[in-house]
Image (cartoon, rainbow, N blue to C red):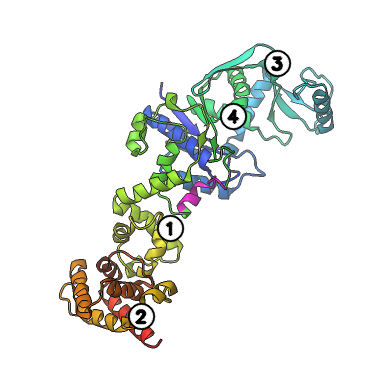
Amino acid sequence: MTVKTRFAPSPTGFLHVGGARTALFSWLYARHCNGQFVLRIEDTDRERSTQEAIDAIIDSMKWIDLKWDEGPYYQTKRFDRYTEVINKLLAEGKAYKCYCSKERLEKMRDEQMKAGLKPRYDGHCREDHTAHSPDEPYVIRFRNPDDGVVAFDDMVKGHIEFKNSELDDFIIQRSDGTPTYNFCVVVDDWDMGITHVIRGDDHVNNTPRQINLYKALGAPVPVFCHLAMILGDDGAKLSKRHGAVSVMQYREDGYLPEALVNYLVRLGWSHGDQEIFTRDEMIKLFTLDAITKSASGFNTKKLDWLNAHYMKTLPASEVAKELEWHLNKIGITDLSKGPKAEDVVRNYCERTHTLKEMAQKAACYYQNITEYDQAGVKKWIKEGSVEILQASLEALKALSSWDAKSIDEALENVAKAKEVGMGKVGQPLRIAITGSAMSPGIGDTMMLVGQQRTFDRIQKAIEHFSSK
């Protein structure tokens, strides 16, 4: 049997952490088993589904590099198939039309609740032979078995049973003719040959209804794996204040996709005490029986730690691709006017925590300086600083080789000649050529700025601070 999993988000919002983890676990299990991974967009909720959300989901999947083998399939493009299956169920007496009004259903539920009963449809229209006019609205309900139990062995939660007497005849087609989630998902999984359904445990209560429908259709029942929820650090349900933002927001905030994926895989799955995994290691080691039953806690500090690790250990050329995206986001689109992005990565990967921060600090290498950091100016531009800048400029222009070592040696000679520490030479120069007193080594910084631009900026700073 070829293992086939799927990720089936509803495009009523962006892809968040919980959904991304579900997608990752489904993808990893398929890859571990040399199987297939399907992307399906469950967009039957026409009022809430948006193209913006669909685009965001697909962009997120691409960014974290979860390539699908089939899809994306869209449920709204499969309505003919759903109608075909519904008509078959009607013909076999496994589904029926329900003409109950909204008022009757509300009254029924109120009475059940007052009697201490679990609200459920009472089957009023199961055997209804009343004549109805062609234009009278109706829904179609699945005829759920009256007795017995629905049992399944969940790969995470273990053996689960539901009494059929607690389940009602759920709606499979709305009065407007559109099919419902619990119906579509069963038909889709059947048609697409899904063998393993990995999803959040908020779907556990849907599972017995879906199993009864699989059996009514004569379809194989897949293996179910329900993932425990993700909690915030404080034990409360994950929310935006804990970090439950869209996956693409993590990109906006400067995280690497490798860091986010590594973080997600450890939310409910483990392999000993190992914390850092390559993609190949995840695929090799991932199994469903290693998923934990308990809820996972979101920890932003751990994500930050992983991001710092990958910024320093991934090839600079790979990190540079993401840095370029961040530079573009702050308006730097012509990177030919500055250093190679991978050179920026090499110089700043130890000095910054996110790529967003790196891009902001690197902006000075691609754009003209319009102002100087006032705190740095106050601390480092003193009496004699202009003369030091002038002497440094002359020493730099005299260099026959423009490299970090030669630059550093020339400036050390300036410091000796002026009988000052390197701080009184290097810091004014940093302010002159980057606008800030914070940067990598002065030689490396000048290499990033470039020779002629370094000369021009020092000259401009001399003129600026001479007039003060």
Could you tell me if the residues under marks 2 and 1 are in contact, i.e. CB atoms within 8 Å?
Answer: no
Q: Where is residue 310 drawn, in percent x and y? A: 35, 47
Per the image, label 4 sits on a secondary structure element best described as: helix
Between marks 2 and 1 in the image, the one whose residue lies nearer the viewer: 2
Marked residue nearer the N-terminal end (2 or 1): 1
From what the image shows, is residue 61 above or below residue 253? above
Who's the residue at 30% across and 60% down the image?
A: 347
From what the image shows, is residue 238 above or below residue 214? below
The residue at which mark 1 appears reads as 356
Gap in angstroms between the C-alphas marked 2 and 4: 67 Å
Marked residue nearer the N-terminal end (4 or 1): 4
Who's the residue at 41% across and 24% down the image?
A: 2
How crowded is the residue under tag 2: few (<14 C-alpha within 10 Å), some, or many (20+)?
few
How crowded is the residue under tag 3: few (<14 C-alpha within 10 Å), some, or many (20+)?
few
Marked residue nearer the N-terminal end (2 or 3): 3
**Identity, as a three-letter code, of the amino acid under mark 3:** Ser
Split into 4 quadrants, where in the image is the N terminus? top left
Residue at the limit of the structure toward the left, as seen here: 400
Per the image, label 2 sits on a secondary structure element best described as: loop
**Identity, as a three-letter code, of the amino acid under mark 2:** Lys
Gap in angstroms between the C-alphas marked 2 and 1: 32 Å
Please state the extent of the stretch shown in magenta in the rendering.
241-251
Per the image, label 1 sits on a secondary structure element best described as: helix
Q: Quadrant of residue 202?
A: top right
How crowded is the residue under tag 4: few (<14 C-alpha within 10 Å), some, or many (20+)?
few
The residue at which mark 4 appears reads as 203
Residue at the limit of the structure toward the bottom, as seen here: 467
The residue at which mark 3 appears reads as 165
